[in-house]
Image (cartoon, rainbow, N blue to C red):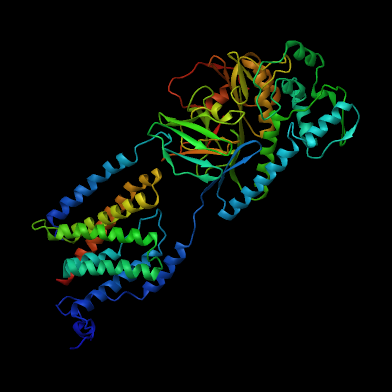
Amino acid sequence: MTSSLLTRSDWLLLIASVALLPWLYGSFWGSTGGMGEEVHIMVDGRELPPISLSKDQTLTIQGSIGPSVLEVANHGIRFISSPCQGKQCIHSGWHTHAGEFAACLPNRVALLITGRESRYDTFNY
Amino acid sequence: MAADPATRYPGLDDGARPLRRPARALPLLLVLLLFVGGCSREELHHAQLFSFGTLVDISLWGASSTQAEHAERIIQEELQTMHRAWHPWLPGPLTETNRRLQTGSWFDCPPELLPLIMQAKRLYELSDGLFNPAIGKLVALWGFHSDVPPQGPPPEPAAIQQLLNQHPGMDDIAIDGKRLRSRNPAVQLDLGAFAKGYAVDRIIGRLERMGIKNAIINAGGDLRAIGRHGKRPWRIGIRNPRGPGVLASVELSGDESVFTSGDYERFYEYEGKRYHHIIDPRTGHPAAGVTSVTVIHDNAAEADAAATALFVAGPDGWYPVARKLGIKYVMLVDDKGGIHMNPAMAERIRFEITDRPEIIYSKPL
Amino acid sequence: MDKTLVATVEDHRIALLAALAITIHIAESALPTPLPGIKPGLANIITIATLCLYGLRTAAWVLMLRVLAGSLLLGTFLSPTFALSFSGAVAALLVLSVARLTPGLGFGAVGYSLLAAMAHMAGQFTVAYWLFIPHPALLQLFPVLMTAAVLFGLVSGIIVATMLKHFR
């Protein structure tokens, strides 16, 4: 009926395009389980460029009273040393999920984890 | 008869017919489209403040941007006011009250403290003294009354015993209208296990009066949530008290608080042993046997006090205390990793960890 | 010698088609989009029809004029929106050039329309992601955008093919 509107190549292209779509969904929508993908670090209210959680590394952030050292490993991040007295930041342990936040308040260093899926609105601890 | 298309549309003289003149409906359609395009969507507003000595995380749903910004400013101001008023050791209304309590005479209670003290008394009775904000001296003895955490060593047993022998309790405080008096000079108020919850309740009340119906106020991990996240409930992740990641999740809709007391919040280690800040008023030592207690309850102040009281009560004693306090959902993680819950809590909680821990079910609450 | 600009027949043609494309483009810009980047792309009907009737060069002119004049009229010239529009158009043109100039491929209006729509969307998305919002959440949008591109490309293509059938 409408076959004269589409040439043979048109049909092939159409089929190929439609077949491409499920693959796209598979690749880009792969479930991350709400795990974090990037961490946004804020120093004294100023935001640093986001850092990917997929590459293991150690970061030293200069806060208002000294350097806070953060470790990125296994798609998570934690404070390993900080000049604050209370060390709450270190006690808070590993942060792995999208939406998690942690901070060294005296040093004015805070971090927020973001990811494609945010499985939780917030965290209780 | 229409004019020859070729002359009306110069440039199309190679025989092709011109495209039809757009219908007169097009301008109307344009106007309609522009009108519809002006409608905006509701969305989630998220902000973080440093206040009350901790990180406060605010989520608002369904508020306009101006409303959200206004709310965030108000919240920050209120938190700062309350923090100053209830600060346990920096000079302020609470330190002044503690000084006057030691004299034993009647005095006018600062208005910002009276409702707290009244509610604290009530919760002290209901928890059989396990929630006891009158043991400020004991908390200070352990070194938790300053920004600088204690380094150790722990206090001498004799010093602890001396304070214990004086039995400071909330029942030592008498209230007459707006006036207070303490019959026991050992009474010193430390509202740490309670003030945060109370503050969260105040903030939520403020938001509701502002017309905001869906929000989460999370003060350093303890939170109260009202309404929903748009079409779905709020999803709360309960962090694993020992290790990374999320232990369990729970959904909240309506008006509920989730509070957790843990041995990992404020502590120090001395010679390989951990000393945390939740002091058992009966022994004078940090409460033993428990890693964390999570409570779901309607108001935040009671949830805060209950989480502390149940932590002190321990794996063997929490059930009757929870009943008396009217708490309906409790999850206690003991120091061996075992999880104690009542059936209703087990139904609401969804474990997110791969290996199921040992669960001990209590009777229904 | 006479130095005045003389408009050729082809110039008139391009101007008229471009004007049509711009009008549709502007009308479309008022549509609310469920997600940023999803628009029916009705102006592409003009581009593809032009390609089939008058060839690649005319179509290229019409497309670029539409992007340029459209952005001037909407007030988005040299803005990020313009960068997106422009890169989408360039991507579409490249793909169309290859499709048109490679002998023996045998595409019709629908084929060109599909290629143009997909290339346009992919080009826009690439610029949006790399230059403006390198946020992982944006990646989730990509399959949805490409689905819209295939859908609208198909619909536009069928409209053009039907129109052409009636002209010839």
Q: As rendered, which of A70 and C165 lies closer to the eye?
A: A70
Residue B256 makes an appearance in the image: yes
Rendering quarter of residue C140: top left
Placement of C166 over or under A84, stated as above or below: below
Residue placed farthest to the front in the image?
A66
Q: Is residue C87 left or right of residue B46?
A: left
| Depicted C39 relative to depicted B190: above or below | below
In the rendered view of the protein, which quadrant contains the C terminus of chain B?
top right
* Nearer the observer, B87 or B294: B87
Total marks drawn?
A: 0
Left or right: residue A103 versus residue A8 is: right
Q: Residue at x 19, y 47 (%)?
A: A16
**Left-right relation of B344 to B157:** left
Extreme residue toward the top, this view: B158
Q: Decide if residue B224 is on the left or right side of residue C161.
A: right
Q: As displayed, is residue B14 above or below residue B128? A: below
Q: Is residue A2 in view? A: no
Residue B127: give x, y in percent of width and height: 72, 22
